[in-house]
Image (tube, rainbow, N blue to C red):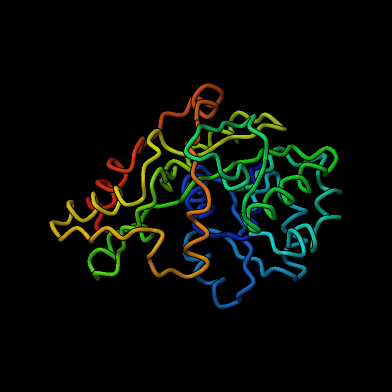
Amino acid sequence: MAKTLLSFGHGYSAQALAALLIPQGWRVIGTTRDTARADAIRATGAEAAVFGTDDVARALGAATHILTSAAPEATGDPVLAAYGDAIADAAPRIEWAGYLSTTGVYGDHQGGWVDETTALTPATRRGQWRKDAEEAWAAIPGLALHIFRLAGIYGPGRGPFEKVRQGTARRIVKEGQVFSRIHMDDIAQVLAASIARPNPGAVYNLCDDDPAPPEDVIEHAARLLGLPVPPAEAYETAEMTEMARSFYAESKRVRNDRIKDELGVRLIHPDYRSGLAALLAGGD
């Protein structure tokens, strides 16, 4: 029987996985709340199902695999709120389910290392929502769930070059601050590797090998473009939105040994230098 992936919240990362699966003969069905966006999903070779309609229930009936990347809300996980009972009913025949979470569930470790066994102590409201959503998905009996905790995502159309070109990039410096990040290509290959080697209950960190201060990434991007490096701004005095400032509330280095040891993954972009060079070569 043909493999069918139902992708809830079919966004950036899910589309990268679909681009690997569709050429292999997979049927991919992506959900969206925006009917206007359905055509964009179809243009990638996937089918579209409007969230909240019977189309999604029918797609769930055909699915052999599930991926969910829909962001949780204060009221909980929107996918489970709408389709939790149906997913629980389908669980025994779902071969693989993936939940895209965030390394934000680990909270702040003042630049220290974390791995998949580290206690979850989120420091932000969004991180707590993700932790709650992980637990809600894991509580579905018999679901072959795999949790993927993603670091900062970048890739085509989602990198620093445009802001550097426009002169809007900022180098905010906070002493000891480091972030881990992951290129879209590597997200897709890790998910595909997990589908090929399912291990229900597994949790994987998705990040590259080089946690780095965010100001270093902006500086490197500017130098690749041959443009002036934006001046450093002290975090303590920089004007930022509450949302932007919240990203600096946590500092940690994330280990990725498990995706290599268990899934045999060799990162395409093991650090931001490799990833940015590839983006620039690709015309980003």
Asked whether residue 181 appears in the rendered view, the answer is: no
Say left or right for 56 vs 148. right
**Which of 25 and 43 lies nearest the eye of the viewer?**
43
- Please, which residue is most extreme toward the left here? 226
Residue located 50% across and 36% down the image: 254
Quadrant of the snapshot with the C terminus: bottom left
Residue 146 in the image: state x and y as whole percent.
Answer: 67, 38
**Which of 58 and 34 lies nearest the eye of the viewer?**
34
- Please, which residue is most extreme toward the bottom here? 36
Disc tally is 0
- Please, which residue is most extreme toward the front here? 237
Residue 223 in the image: state x and y as whole percent.
Answer: 17, 52
Residue located 55% across and 59% down the image: 46
**Which of 26 and 175 lies nearest the eye of the viewer?**
175
Residue located 86% across and 55% down the image: 85
Say left or right for 197 vs 113. right
Asked whether residue 192 appears in the rendered view, the answer is: yes
Residue 210 in the image: state x and y as whole percent.
Answer: 37, 36
Residue 82 in the image: state x and y as whole percent.
Answer: 79, 64
In which quarter of the view is residue 53 placed?
bottom right
In which quarter of the view is residue 135 placed?
top right
